[in-house]
Amino acid sequence: MRPGHWKTGLIAVLVIAAFSAVWMTFGTGTPDEEPGQQSYVIGLVTNNPNGLSNVAGFREGLAELGFVEGENTTFLFSGEPTPRPQLESAISKMVADGADLIFTAGTPTGVAAHAATKTSGTPVVFGVIADPIRAGVMTDLTRPGGNMTGVMLSKNQARRLEVMHELFPDARRILLPYNPEDPAPVSAAQQLDAIAPELGLTLVHGHARDNDEVTALLADIPEDIDAVFMLPDSTVNRRIKDLIKATNARGIPVSGPSLAQIEAGALMSYGIVHHEVGVQAAEIAQRLLRGADPATMPVQTADFYYVINAAATERIGIAVNEDALRRADLIVREDRLTN
């Protein structure tokens, strides 16, 4: 995403979705029915709070495409994140309740859906799985070959580290807090390990497999850490409030993987907007509901945005030069910590 094109990028997602809907209806021979000619049951599930924004975007995107709740669409959704140990059983129940399609937000949720729908073959649209191949849900992104397709993250973590290094050139020791048993942050960490020596950076891997280990990690951040680089990892990211509190106390800048962490107080991001990923996934879902085959539908890549939190720079006393501000797609002037 080019700097200065924040609104254009968001509008483009909706334009592309609308164009694709028209193309599928009039431009191909795919068997389909217009929304309203039959009813649809769609399961919605996420394992983390940020995924609720994905779900909201997905529902709004489907409504724009003619799949309207209360008219021709029924959603199976608890309204809250489903704890990770309960994901597979929750999705299995959606299958048993007659879901025509299931939307998942978050890598652990997508992995659980892969296991829960193997027998039924119920179509699954994910938005997102960080790395679908590493997560084990497919072996080919172009022709997934099963009942799943959706939106993935690009290999942008290295670029985000470069951007952070440009913003904070004096930051040399970078803490990576993440769950080593989650394939999403592990894949991201490997991208960073490959480029860190070129930037003259030392990465400190802080492992936290559960909530208690996150608490211990945040209570004992090494004194020589210059910055924190969050990864796409629900175990750590659900504790964003505590992480920001711990780093603010020491004036340590934080880079987050999405707009959600910026809104919670992180200083910069080069990543996704959860709501827009949901909108993007809705376009894929409407094609499946009209008869397209997920086995032959390529996985799409989410759009990324460069965001700087001006409120955070003031809070921890770090100056960001005007050139960096001009290159940002979005500047947040007020976050939750200043509301």
Image (spheres, grey):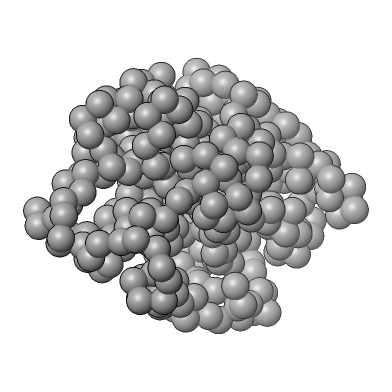
Q: Which residue is drawn at 45% across and 27% down?
A: 118
Q: Is residue 79 visible?
A: no
Tell me: 157 left or right of 101.
right
Q: Which quadrant holds residue 14?
A: bottom left
Q: In this view, does 117 lie above or below 2?
A: above
Q: Is residue 35 visible?
A: yes
Q: Which residue is drawn at 64% across and 67% down?
A: 319
Tell me: 33 left or right of 180.
left
Q: From the top left corner, tell me how far across and down residue 323 is, in percent.
A: 68, 79
Q: Which residue is drawn at 68% across and 56% down?
A: 156
Q: Which quadrant holds residue 60?
A: bottom left
Q: In this view, does 70 lie above or below 176?
A: below
Tell me: 23 left or right of 320.
left
Q: Residue at x 46, y 67 (%)?
A: 332
Q: From the top left corner, tell me how far across and down residue 270 is, in percent.
A: 60, 60
Give the residue furthest to the left: 70
Q: From the top left corner, tell me how far across and down residue 209 is, in percent.
A: 57, 21
The foreground one among 2 and 237 is 2
Q: From the top left corner, tell me how far across and down residue 202 is, in percent.
A: 83, 41
Tell me: 182 left or right of 315.
right
Number of marks = 0
Rendered-image quadrant of the C terminus:
bottom left
The foreground one among 226 and 329 is 329
The foreground one among 221 and 324 is 324
Q: In this view, does 124 lie above or below 19?
A: above
Rendered-image quadrant of the N terminus:
bottom right
